Image (cartoon, rainbow, N blue to C red):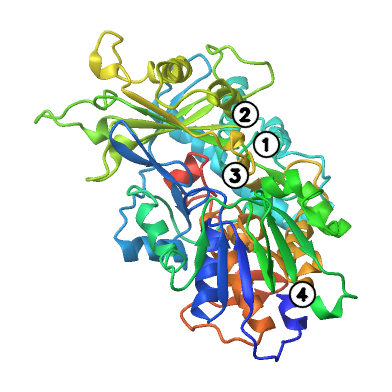
Amino acid sequence: MQALRNASTLSSGRIPHVAVIGAGIAGLRCSDVLARSGVKVTLLEARDRIGGRVDQQESGGYLVDMGPNWIHGTSGNPIMHLAEKTGTTILEPEEHQALFDSDGERRPDAEAVALSSKMWEMIVDAFKYSDEHSADIDPGVSLFEYFRSKLDTDKKLTRQQRQDLLHEAQMWGPFVGDSVEKQSLKFFFLEECIEGENVFVAGTYKDILKEIGRVATDEGKVDLRLGTEVVHFETRSDSDKDDYGKVIVTASCGDQSTFDDVVITCPLGWLKRHHARAFTPTLPSRLASAISHINYGRLEKLYVTFPSAFWLSSDAEGKPDLSSYPVHTHFHDPAYVPHACGEAWNQSVVSLAHLPPPCTQPTLLFYIYGPCGTHVVDSIKDLTTHSTEYDTVLNSFASAFYSRLPNYDPSSPACQPKSFLMTRWQADPFAGNGSYCNFQVGLERGDEDIEVMRDAGGLWKRGLWLAGEHTAPFIALGTTTGAWWSGEGIARRICAKWGIKVPGDAAAATEENGTTGVQGAKKKELDKDRADAANLSGLAI
């Protein structure tokens, strides 16, 4: 918040007109705080709906989240507060999980727990090592290389145990949104999370999104323009005193509008693809390099719905016995599925049959990332959802995994999927052709890059601001919570710039030891002996 401290307050008494670009979580929260502070707000969204990457669709008669499924850290988390306020059902999954090795054989449950627990210990060590020694770590060293070096020095491990742990290490790909072979050890500490448990949003983000967008969708408070794709921004030079601070926004249809301030909440992937031509004058070199340096993940999701949850055995009353099979299943990189050498196609699968009523559904959720995610998206990106060809392609991929689950019988109707639904974020230009920010090998100043984007390279002085999960406080990068805090933080800074008082119900942004945070939330203290199901499944720190 150093920029806020240095900002001079405009004392004209004029109410500014602010454009917010993008109606995702950051844009909605920013619009909310600005509008309730009395600012004139125009919210421009390229899609025909609000939410951005928070979206729900129906598959097999059930509503599912295409974007985030989790709330990462419950202590002092505003998204958790919204879940409670809206009565959204959540699940804190059990720690037990099933494991299938590279040959497709299910390992004993005790062995699966031992492997995931050992890997969690290594994750905690890697995180602390990155946090304490980041300045001295070679930018070219990956998280996977760190794991391998630790395993090489552990003489108590057998060759098979070492190989199993290296495969287990790859299960952290879904968390970072790409291969752990690409994850920077130097900046692994930036994957830190909020204190508290990681919970699955069983009732979907539907009602949470509705509450977040309540003010933005009120036409009496915010001018919401859906279906409006913004393609260019022009800021006045410092010498244009009469128009100082004015920003001209151009839509894809050619329409232009002028605003006092513009908040760009477009995904990092969009900025990476368009920053060189979307701004006049060109962005400051340090800001452009920061956008280029921070990477963008490739996490996708596949929902496979069956007539019933065949992987669960029946209890004495003929009802599904949830204790007969765990929520989480790990499939190590499969030797039985053809794919390019050097690409890890391991799968993390969640059984939605374990969700509490009324959210229970006979569905398997696959988290697919990196090259594997790219392969599947490329296979279906031009196909009509739920078409025969679409279902056939997805079944040819998923069947290699679900056919290994308990009680599977290819001749049983219960084991034949009735619906498939796959995300296509990598083929979605409005999502930035990806999922969320991450930090890959070769990155030299990752923390500084985030801070530069958070400050928009100083362009806020000309009325241009950046917000989104990629500019969030370090404890919430890449999350809906981070997007919320980022949008709120920019709204507060704009109000401070114009001398406008912000309503007291918004959490106040703070800065401590150079790190932007939020009151009521703190960095999670990692403990090798205290892990939840998301930790052990490689889906959250």
Disc 3 to disc 1, how far (Cα)? 32 Å
Report which quarter residue 167 is drawn in: top right
- Contact (CB < 8 A) between labels 1 and 2? yes
**Sequence-earlier tag: 4 or 3:** 4
User: Could you tell me the amino acid type at mark 4?
Assistant: Gly
- Contact (CB < 8 A) between labels 4 and 3? no
Horizontal relation, residue 405 to residue 498: left or right: left
> Where 170 falls versus 191 (above or below)?
above
Q: Residue furthest top?
A: 411
User: Could you tell me the amino acid type at mark 1?
Assistant: Phe
Tag in front: 3 or 1: 3
Report which quarter residue 351 is drawn in: top left
Q: Which residue is mark 3?
A: 431
Q: Which residue is mark 2?
A: 166
Disc 1 to disc 4, how far (Cα)? 50 Å
Disc 1 to disc 2, how far (Cα)? 7 Å
Q: Which residue is mark 4?
A: 245
Q: Quadrant of the N terminus?
A: bottom right
User: Could you tell me the amino acid type at mark 3?
Assistant: Ala
Disc 4 to disc 3, how far (Cα)? 28 Å
Residue at 80%, 48% (x, y): give it. Answer: 277
- Contact (CB < 8 A) between labels 3 and 2? no
| Residue 239 appears in the rendering | yes
**Sequence-earlier tag: 4 or 2:** 2
Indicate the secondary structure of the residue bearing disc 1: helix
Residue at 61%, 35% (x, y): give it. Answer: 426
